[in-house]
Structures are given as C-alpha cells and as structure tokens.
Image (spheres, coloured by chain):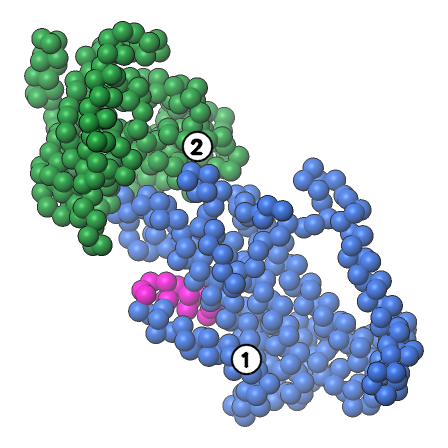
Amino acid sequence: MSAGTETGIGLRVSTPVVAEEVAPPTLSPGGRFRWSIVIGPLVTLALFIAFWEYMHRDGMRRFFNKPGFLVPSPATVIDQSFLDDVVRIQMFKGLGWTALSAFIGLAIAIVVGIGIAVLMATAEWIERSMYPYLVALQAIPVLAIVPLIGSVFGGGIGSRIFVCVMISIFPIVTNTLFGLTSVDPAQHDLFTLRQVSRRTRLWKLQFPAAMPAIFTGFRISAGLAVVGAVVGEQFFREGDKPGIGVVVEQFRQKARFPQVYGGLMVAAALGIAVFFLFGLLGKLVVGKWYEPSRRSS
Amino acid sequence: MTETTTSTMTQARRQTVLSFDDVSRTFPDGTFALSSTTFDVALGEFVAIVGPSGCGKSTLLRVASGLDAPSTGTVTVDHDSLGYVFQDPTLLPWRDVRGNVGLFAELDGMARSETARRVAENVRLVGLEGFEDKYPKQLSGGMRMRASLARSLVMDPDIFLFDEPFGALDEITRERLNDELLGLFQRKGFGALFITHSIVEAVFLSTRVLVMSQRPGRIIESFDVPFAYPRSHDLRFEADFAELSGEISHALRGAHA
C-alpha cells in the first residue's frame, strides 16, 4: 500500500487521454549517451527514405499506375525546396505566420481550456453538464466546420486562430480536469484537516498536483494547434499573411510537387518543435519533484 | 497495582484533550465500522489502540480528527490543536522538506517569520537538519515519516493522532523513531492516540493500551502501562514488559475469536 502511494502523485490511474511521460531516450540513467538508443530510429529513417525513393522510381507506376513525379525523390525535394533560396525564404516566412496563429490559438485554448476545467472540477454536475458537448466539439470534423467558421470570422488570420483553438482545446480541458480531480485523497485530507477554503485547496493542492497532467495536455495541444493553423490556412488565404499551408496550396495548384513535399516537412517540423518545446517546459516546471511511474519492462 | 491507580488519578485531574462519548460510525453502504466507543485522552497521556486488521481503528482516528463524522455519540476535540500523522507520510511531492513541514502553519495563515522559525526548530527536532531543500522523492521512508511528524509538530498540538505511522518501516528505523517519538512526547507533553498492530510498539510507547474487537470495532479491554519514562530501548526485553504484552496478546486473541 505504501509503495504505491509513495511513487504516485495521483496519476496512477491510467486514462487514454494522458500520454505516458517518457524521459528523453538519448541518455542512459547515468547520463551517458548510448548509441544503441539512436540506432533504432536511424534505421527506421533509412528504411523510410529507401521506401520513398523506391516509390518515386518504380512503386507509383507499378502499384498505382501513376507517374513517379507525383512522389518526387527525397533528393529532389531537398534540392528544390530547401536549397532554392526563393522557395526557402517563402517557406520560412510562411512558417512564421503559421507559428504565429498556432501560438495565439494555443494561448487562447490554454486560458479558456483551463478555465473550463476549473469550472468542471468545482462540481460534478457542471462536469456532467459540459462533458458531452466537449466530446461533441472534438467529434465535429474540422474540415466540415471550417467553411462555417469562415462565414463568421472572414477569411483572414482570425479564422485560422479560431480553428487552432477549436482543435487544441479538448486535450487541455481533459488533462487539466483529470489532473485537478485525481489528487490523492490522503493529500486532500491534509487540507480538510486545516479546514481550508476551496480556493486555497485549488491553488495549493489541485493545481500543483495537476501540473504534470496539464503539461501533457499542453504538449498534445501544441501539435494540434499547428495542424489547426495549417488546415485553417488551406481554407482562409486572404490577407497578406500567407502561412505555410497557403504556400503548400499554391505549389500544389502549380503542380510543383517537390515544393509541396518540402512544405509539408517544414510544417511537420514546426509541430515536432512545439511538441518538444512543451515537453522541455514541462520538465523545467515539474522535473524537480515529479517521478513519472515507469512501466516495468 | 497501587502505582497504576495513582497514575490514573493523576490523569483524571489533567486536561482532557480528546473525548469519545458512546461514538459509533456506520458508513452509507451499511458497513458498521465502529460501535459505542467511549474513552478519553488527557494531556501527557499516550494511548495506544491495538486490534485486528479491519476492526475500524482507522475509522476511529478519522472520526477523532473530524475527517469523518460520528453516526451517533459525541466527539470532543479542539481541531485547531490537533496533530495527525497518517499511515503514509503523505508529503506533497512538489514541496521540499521546508515547504512540507510548514504546510499546516501556512494553511492556518501563521505569519511567515513565525512559520519559518517553527519549521527550523521542528526540522531540527526530528533530525532533518540539512535536508530542508530536498524533495520527498529524494528522501528515504524514515525521513519522509520524520518530515510528516514535523509538519504536525509545527502546530504544537495538544492532541496527536497517529495512524500506524511506522508500520511500513524496517524494524531498526521503527525502533529509532519510537525512541524519538517518546523523546518528543516527554518534551512536549501532548496527549497521543496511537494506532498500531504491533503489541510491542503499543506497550513500549504508551501509558495505556486499548484493545479493540473485530468489526464493528469497540473497546473490549484497557491495560494501564506502568513503566516510567524515559523508557530505555531494553525495556522491550524485560520480564514485566513481556508479561503485559502477553496479557494484551491474549485479549487480542479473544477479540479475534
């Protein structure tokens, strides 16, 4: 009994919403770099690039009866999107705009999402009244609702931000709510003994205890916000702020496939970057005290 | 038994800090956990409760602390002067030792300087000096328990509740903490209610041992423990000690039957 309680901080209950916290795999417990840990991913990458190259040379024609230029070879993609100055500058400018709407959207989602989670955590009836609609929000196909958003917010950056908020708010609400409500009952007892106010309990117990879960939510949502920004851009191309989604779409219309692939890689890189940024941020905030329960393998 | 009688009379004149008057507790699901329990704990009195597992010992403590309400009967206790050491240390993992030890004081709105002073004093008292900046995950089980003890000591309670606090620790750590707890008890003179499943621990620590029956738990026997404080480590191996432990064990066996 004591062993379980000591290692846990209320995250012992596994839920599908909360991703398992995984330590960066490149360092061994002693802090030494281990090659064996990076070899696996590198081999996977090599296999993937080989498959890609094969699809370009032969696979597209053989399996789909389509020309190979639809899947340009990796070398062509790099050459024509990243080594071409004009294209590269266009892409990275686009990336900047995309990052801007993603971050604004994420910031709004964080503030509103945590607010909703706190509200839901105050009483079970509020949670029950709101939860189905959050799930519904999550279940609405983004692509189907995006045109409707446009008719309200217009075709500019406002609509893109709205899409980001819509797509990224759910993991923040669920993870925050989970964190706030799954505090160890024994820790609650400590606060009950001193007869504290609900507010004190929230600030000094529930929020600190929920931090690991909250950061898991941020991390998932950060990636989603980037997806939302790109999807939004594909629909809302007005204004002077062409994000990476707009850039990709323009290349696609001109059938410049190497640049389309390059643009997608850049967009994915942004998603990966924010994912790790929030992972790092979470580590800085809770790493000092939080021990993620590791699966025994 | 004259000695015992005298000590009981002395206690009667002391201030009662916890009083159970015909208290029972039935849970909403129908579990009858505690049945017509009556006893008092006075300042300077160390009462240990032993009983079969699942007999409602923990329920009794929760009711005593106000975490749970009695179904019938009355509990009289000053909640502002109550210390509670849980079965697990229950430290907040995001607070270092200093922050954990000062938790209750902080929640009660004690002035910062006063909190800091008391934290420093009690961290020293439980032997955690030099570990103020460590987080719970960096501490051993015994050290966590010391921090948990210090957290309540900071409030300078009149009544101290212990819920099998040392049960999960190894024998040597446990005996050391027993000795240290008695040191604190003599020094501070609080009233203590200590739950344990170890008869030796109960007799070694207390002035009185109460034996509880199986569920629904109630107190079936009471033994006064005559040994004077300070109690030496070797008391555990003396004949009188063994005899009393034997009697309690016998009563406990009766409770099991």
Residue A229 in the image, given as x and y percentages of width and height: 63, 77
Callout 1, which amino acid?
A: Phe
In terms of secondary structure, what is the magenta stretch mainly?
helix
In the displayed structure image, the side of residue A178 where residue B256 appears, left or right: left
Q: Quadrant of the N terminus of chain A?
A: top left
In the displayed structure image, the side of residue B194 where residue B216 appears, left or right: left
Q: How many marks?
A: 2
In the image, residue B24 sits, relative to residue A54, either above or below, namely: above
Residue B153 in the image, given as x and y percentages of width and height: 31, 29
Quarter-of-image position of residue B50: top left
Identify the element where label 2 is drawn.
helix
**Mark 2 = which residue?**
B144
Residue A94 in the image, given as x and y percentages of width and height: 73, 77
| Chain depicted in green | B
Q: Which residues are magenta?
A: A111-124
Give the color of chain A as drawn: blue
Residue A270 in the image, given as x and y percentages of width and height: 70, 68
Name the chain under label 2. B
**Can residue A122 be found in the magenta stretch?**
yes
At a point 18% along the width and 41% down the height, the residue shown is B216
Name the chain under label 1. A
**Mark 1 = which residue?**
A162
Observer-side mark, 1 or 2, equals 2
Is residue B98 visible in this depiction of the protein? yes
Q: Which numbered dot is residue A18?
A: none
At a point 85% along the width and 68% down the height, the residue shown is A49
Identify the element where label 1 is drawn.
helix
At a point 11% along the width and 9% down the height, the residue shown is B1
